[in-house]
Amino acid sequence: MAKRSRNTDSSAPRSIIATLITAIVLVIAVAIGGITGVDVLSLLGLTTPVATAVVTVAPPGTEVANVPGNVTTLNVGQGFGAQKGFWQVFFTAPTGSRDTSTYVNGIEMQLAAAIDQLKSGDTLDIAAYEFNLPALTKAVLDAHRRGVRIRMVTDTQHGLEDDDSTVPQLVAAGIPVVDDKRTAFMHNKFMILNGATVWTGSWNFTINDTYRNNNNALALRSRRLAERYQAEFDQMFNNRRFGPNKTPSATTTFTQDGVPIQLYFAPEDRVLQAIVATIGSAQKSVRFLTFSFTDFDVAKAIMDRAAANPNILVQGIFETTGSETQASELRTLRCAGLDARQDSGKSILHHKLFIVDDAIVITGSFNISSNATESNDENLLIIPDPDLAAQYVAEFNRRWAESRAPGGITCN
């Protein structure tokens, strides 16, 4: 027994030294991250675990197409989901039904489960263009009662004053809410969970966008990425700065698990230029799903790339509503001989999505329009990850199967 006591006692100095070395490494890692934007902690395997959605393997019969071996298919009920490493991705699966009793177990339940994991003293910041999902409203109110520190930024007309909005319930509960008080939109749809996980995408936190519209949502575990979203949120919440009054991003590229993620906010960052540059890098294919596509610069980038390399596959789907107007670029692309179609499903195609070379995903709240570029508050991600891109290609193929060539378009 004495020997064991002496051995235990003699290990104490080594333990102290190891602790000091670890602390020094952490300090250096944080310093490097602050200078370069690289998440060194994640590269060293030292990233702190954070709250994310509850993950369950999909039961037999769940669609598993385009799922590489290192990607887990998620059981998300009325929708599709997958995860790998720092990301989880979700797609809505609207049926076209107007029977609200069928609006259950959609992708919002995954986010609600993540919010339910937050504890007293944790933080939840919400930037929501619209907000009325009962499950999310309940999750936020329950978190507030648990002592989670919650703040919200929203659009005045569509988030605070809309008759269907549940934002007034949050205000009545004492949750601080800031609205933009502008005619332009606070069009973001993101949440920051405890400064470590970001949920974002094309998905508004509403019944329509969950059960009647086609959308995508991303949950990203990255403290560096969360810090940049936090800075954007704080400009709006703390400083009441919206639209072109915001300060541009100092850093737009962040490395997570070896993946160089680009993050842009509109209108202060050069969002359109980043999209054009990524499309210009295409070697094999450009696919897109767009709710609104009225900017010629992006259409020109697609046409230029196709002209430079005739072997590049171009496929795109426009939401039908509005796509045959003079403002839409559907006619431009069709008349250039490119395979641009209209969505003919029973739901609204609400994606704002490009997939380049089946390897790079461009997604977020950013419609390809002058409003998004010049006045709305938006966010956009460019993520070069073939496994993530495979999930988006699967969604593209689901929409492509129900698309159609537009009628009534004539070319001069």
Image (cartoon, grey):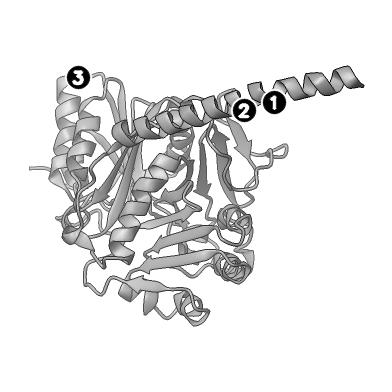
Q: Quadrant of residue 224?
A: top left
Kind of residue at disc 1? Ala
Alpha carbons under labels 3 and 1: distance apart: 66 Å
Alpha carbons under labels 2 and 3: distance apart: 61 Å
Residue 205: percent from the left, percent from the top? 47, 62
Q: Nearer the viewer, mark 2 or mark 3?
A: 2
When the figure is inspected, residue 341 is found, relative to residue 72, above or below; the finding is below
Kind of residue at disc 2? Ile
Viewer-side residue, 283 vs 252: 252
The residue pinned by badge 1 equals: 12
Residue 312 in the figure: left or right of residue 301: right
**Viewer can see residue 27:** yes
Helix, strand or loop at label 2? It is helix
The residue pinned by badge 3 equals: 309
Q: In the image, what residue occupies the spot 20% across and 28% down?
A: 280
Residue 285: percent from the left, percent from the top? 31, 26
Quadrant placement of the N terminus: top right
Q: Which residue is outermost to the left?
A: 412
Residue 155: percent from the left, percent from the top? 33, 69
The residue pinned by badge 2 equals: 16
Is label 3 in contact with label 1 (beta carbons under 8 Å)? no
Of the numbered discs 3 and 1, the one sitting upstream in the chain is: 1
